[in-house]
């Protein structure tokens, strides 16, 4: 089975949800640069202070900061799922120098669907579980089913920011589809399907 996995796709395609499922079932490390950065912001670290403005606008944090941040965390891992990294060709080239990956799974989703999903996305502040008010709401409003934590809306899941994030994705990140295609590593999965079906399709790609 493939063990060094990159998840590509626009914001809201389900990378975080799928990465959590895959990591739990297959003993792989889940590395989400977005989650790491949000934690740095919450702890008000030097990196967090540098990253915050970019994140709130839906812009990308500069490549140098991201590459330094991820380098050390990848070094000792034999199997991992990268969620939200790489996000630019510069980051993908830096990753190639650190180690090789087995597969890049591109979870596809239309612009309309991205906007609708992100506006209704909510996240547990405590355990990070992802909800969607339309398809997968928590049983009790505002309370996480898994851990009882508070459910909130990310600052960058507000309408104006969502549209910018999609534009940034198209400009900076979508070129990675060709980048991995050229290396024979790309596999597409239709992200508009229900979570369980997307998960099955990913497992099929991974050779399970
Ligand atoms: P995400 O949770 O993956 O949607 O990431 C949230 C925000 O964190 C993004 O909109 C960016 O501002 C920043 N971010 C996360 N990963 C990266 C990355 N690989 N490169 C640059 N910025 C990133």
Image: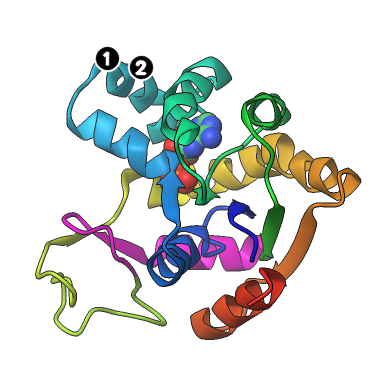
Check the image and report above or below for 112 versus 10: below
Q: Residue 188 magenta-drawn? A: no
Which quarter of the figure has residue 136? bottom left
**Callout 2 crowding tier (Cα within 10 Å): few <14, some 14–19, many ≥20:** some
Q: Residue 112 magenta-drawn? A: yes
Which residue is labeled 2 in the image?
50
Tell me the element at label 2. Answer: helix
**Callout 1 crowding tier (Cα within 10 Å): few <14, some 14–19, many ≥20:** few
**Which quadrant of the figure contains the C terminus?**
bottom right
Check the image and report above or below for 110 versus 168: below
Of the two numbered discs 2 and 1 in the rendering, the one whose residue sits closer to the viewer: 1
Q: Is residue 141 visible?
A: yes
Residue in the foreground of this view, choosing between 176 and 50: 176
Marks counted in the figure total 2
Q: Residues at badges 2 and 1 in contact (C-beta under 8 Å)? A: yes
Check the image and report above or below for 10 versus 35: below
User: Where is residue 160 drawn, in percent x and y?
Assistant: 47, 45
Which portion, as a residue range, is magenta?
A: 110-130
Which residue is labeled 1 in the image?
46
């Amino acid at each position: 089975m493939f063990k060094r996995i990159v998840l590509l796709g626009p914001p809201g395609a389900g990378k975080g949800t799928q990465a959590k499922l895959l990591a739990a079932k297959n003993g792989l490390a889940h590395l989400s640069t977005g989650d790491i950065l949000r934690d740095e912001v919450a702890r008000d670290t030097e990196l967090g202070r540098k990253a915050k403005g970019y994140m709130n606008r839906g812009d990308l944090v500069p490549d140098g900061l991201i590459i330094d941040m991820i380098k050390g965390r990848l070094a000792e891992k034999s199997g991992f799922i990268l969620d939200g990294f790489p996000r630019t060709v510069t980051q993908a080239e830096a990753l190639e120098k650190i180690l090789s990956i087995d597969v890049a799974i591109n979870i596809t989703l239309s612009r309309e669907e991205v906007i609708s999903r992100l506006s209704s996305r909510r996240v547990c502040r405590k355990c990070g579980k992802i909800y969607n008010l339309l398809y997968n709401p928590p049983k009790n409003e505002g309370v996480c089913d898994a851990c009882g934590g508070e459910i909130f809306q990310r600052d960058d899941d507000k309408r104006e920011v969502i549209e910018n994030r999609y534009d940034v994705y198209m400009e900076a990140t979508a070129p990675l589809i060709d980048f991995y295609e050229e290396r024979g590593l790309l596999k597409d999965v239709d992200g508009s399907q229900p979570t369980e079906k997307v998960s099955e399709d990913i497992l099929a790609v991974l050779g399970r």
